[in-house]
Image: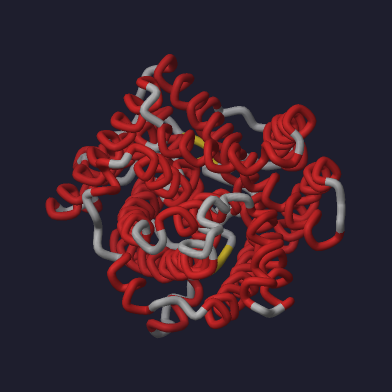
Amino acid sequence: MAINLRAPDHPHQSGWPREAVHVSLPEVHASIPIPATAGFWRKLLAFSGPGFLVAVGYMDPGNWATDLAGGARYGYALLSVIFISNLMAILLQALAARLGIASGRDLAQACRDHYSPSVNIALWLLCEVAIAACDLAEVIGAAIALELLFGLPLIWGVCLTASDVLIVLFLQHHGFRYIEAFVVSLIVIVAIAFGVELWLSKPDLVAVGYGFIPHARIISDPAMLYIALSILGATVMPHNLYLHSSIVQTRKYTDSAESRREAIRFASLDSTVALMSALFINAAILIMAAAVFHGTGHQDVASIEDAYQLLSPLLGSGLASILFAVALLASGQNATLTGTLAGQIVMEGFINIRLRPWLRRLITRLLAIVPAVAVIAIYGNRGADPLLILSQVILSLQLPFAVFPLVQFTSDRRKMGRFATPRWMQALAWTTAVVIAVLNGWLLIQLLGGGI
């Protein structure tokens, strides 16, 4: 296969090394044309897609476990965490898109170009741990859905999720648009399912409104902070920053400043719209859990299986549990697809390992399947749900190691030139990065001190 190269010969790229580097995801790079003379809506449609692949990571089974636990234990109080986390995600994903389009590098490649080899190895390993933790949640979530719907043993369901390698290869062979269409279709299924669940659960709308107002108890209560940070880790996902900075380059914009500026604008709009759909789904899961389980003697429900068993009798409709499991399966399958792509981007970007597409994706999938099989073999089905929440806390702890480089690069005028973020956006981005780091530091202190 021919290797595409790009040379950073544009003025706004002068802060990067001068040698040519490989493009990200070469098999689909610049494969989707952008109509030059089209109007706003046609161009928005052409740029739409990457944001929804990114949004998948914000509504994966890890989110389900944390949102169910948060709603059942604390009612609507943690809706504010979901909302604030989503705003952080919108900002950070816009920065990731800006980096990819303006520099021609994904975040992993940018790190490799900027940091020393030892720092890059450390960042790569941390990112692989985060992807493994995320994949663990996605694989287990999809396997739980298969068990609930079809009675398939959990360990078999985990192994069956390896089929996503074949799905990605088949769809990508026909074009990246097919992957995007498949992902959007599954998101629509999840959204419809939870729209019905919300209608059946009849939440207290006034209490829902108050839930979006932050409370000091979230910080002062260590157990509540643990769930809040697991929601943050499940919402703002580090590997999505690497993924987004790469897949925005599937659009065939030109090297001119005007074309790149337009691409940044439409890519940011695409991800903002997509992440608002993720906000609806995450909030819907927590609202449903608060309405059905909190204050009804079921506030200790944090298990996906228990939620499935209780939904139909508590809501008086057999449809409730079925829709819940169907949405979980769609969510888990979607997340494994995008997680596989992220694993490829990280491996190629940080350490420049280039393998055949099927082999790359098989290795990435095995990194998730092997730990999941081991967990189920040792702890059985009941060990899966606590690990779903723990995996999201691991993601949250790793998040600063992706966020700080991203904010650093996009704020640097030597690297980004005219596309460096404006000062107001830099202030928001650095504030977000510091808040994430401080909250994670507090969580680590609580964990080490036995406060949780």
Q: Tell me what residue is drawn at x 25 percent, y 58 percent.
A: 214
Measuring from the top left, give residue 435's x and y in whole percent: 24, 41
Measuring from the top left, give residue 399's x and y in whole percent: 40, 37
Above/below status of 279 relative to 347: below
Q: Tell me what residue is drawn at x 44 percent, y 52 percent.
A: 235
Between 236 and 77, the one lying in front of the other is 77
Asked whether residue 222 appears in the rendered view, the answer is yes
**Which of the 4 quarters of the picture holds residue 377?**
top right
Question: How many discs appear?
Answer: 0
Asked whether residue 14 appears in the rendered view, the answer is no
Q: Tell me what residue is drawn at x 34 percent, y 72 percent.
A: 207
Above/below status of 345 relative to 29: above
Describe the colour scheme in one phrase.
secondary structure
Q: Tell me what residue is drawn at x 86 percent, y 60 percent.
A: 150
Q: In the image as oriented, which residue stretches furthest toward the left?
A: 423
Q: In the image as oriented, which residue stretches furthest toward the top?
A: 118
**Horizontally, is 436 left or right of 190 in the view?**
left
Above/below status of 117 relative to 84: above
User: In the rendered view of the protein, which quadrant contains the N terminus?
Assistant: top right
**Horizontally, is 452 left or right of 314 in the view?**
left
User: In the rendered view of the protein, which quadrant contains the C terminus?
Assistant: top left
Measuring from the top left, give residue 311's x and y in whole percent: 65, 68
Measuring from the top left, give residue 94's x and y in whole percent: 34, 56
